[in-house]
Image: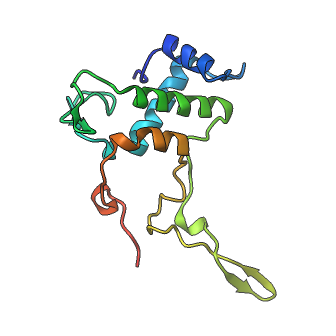
Amino acid sequence: MAGYGDDDLFTTWLSENGYELPASAPSKAILRNRGSQYIDSTYGARFVGEPVDPFTQERAWPRRNAIVGGVSIPETTIPNAVIYASFYAAFQEATNPGSLTAVGSASTNIKREKVGELETEYQNSSSSGSFVDGLTPIMTVVDGMLAPYLRFVPAQSIGIWSIG
């Protein structure tokens, strides 16, 4: 599975932003793939439009019926913001291996529990009540870059349910 963009564009992006990959980082192709996987798994269900070929297409982009700012995005286009957001995620993964994934559960958030003299506090799972909200790593730069390409999707429609 290929990541968004290509290695040459990733190299240019790194240089233009003053970033340098650590010597221990995986190849650029692997990093681009990881960054793209993060973008698709975190934002894919909320992107405007639909995949051009939802049955065989490897990535969330390109899309059809995608309109941003009143302008229709051609079905063959992957917006630069999506490509560059995946590069940012790839750089994050290169400098902090494993940071694009999180493993845990809502039960690991302690708010308050007292056993004898020992007291532990439990957190609510999140303001939206989602189990995954507190686990999904969110990069504000990526969030901002992709905001124009996202549509509002109620949490219940993407399989995230609130608990009373």
Query: At x 20% / y 29%, what residue is drawn?
Result: 52
Instruction: Give x and y (percent) for residue 47.
Output: 31, 42
Instruction: Give x and y (percent) for residue 42.
Output: 43, 44
Left or right, 113 with respect to 71, comes to right
Q: From the image, which quarter does the N terminus lie in? A: top left
Query: At x 50% / y 31%, what residue is drawn?
Result: 35
Q: Can residue 139 be seen? A: no
Left or right, 20 with respect to 117, comes to left
Look at the image and name its color scheme: rainbow
Above or below, 149 against 59 in this view is below
Query: At x 32% / y 46%, what residue is drawn?
Result: 45
Instruction: Give x and y (percent) for residue 101.
Output: 55, 43
Above or below, 158 against 11 in this view is below
Residue at the extreme front of the image, as rendered: 70
Which residue is nearer to you in this view: 21 or 15? 15
Q: Image quarter for residue 23? A: top right
Q: Image quarter for residue 18? A: top right
Which residue is nearer to you in this view: 37 or 14? 14
Q: From the image, which quarter does the C terminus lie in? A: bottom left
Left or right, 53 with respect to 41, comes to left
Query: At x 62% / y 21%, what residue is drawn?
Result: 26
Residue at the extreme right of the image, as rendered: 117
Residue at the extreme bottom of the image, as rendered: 116
Above or below, 69 against 8 in this view is below
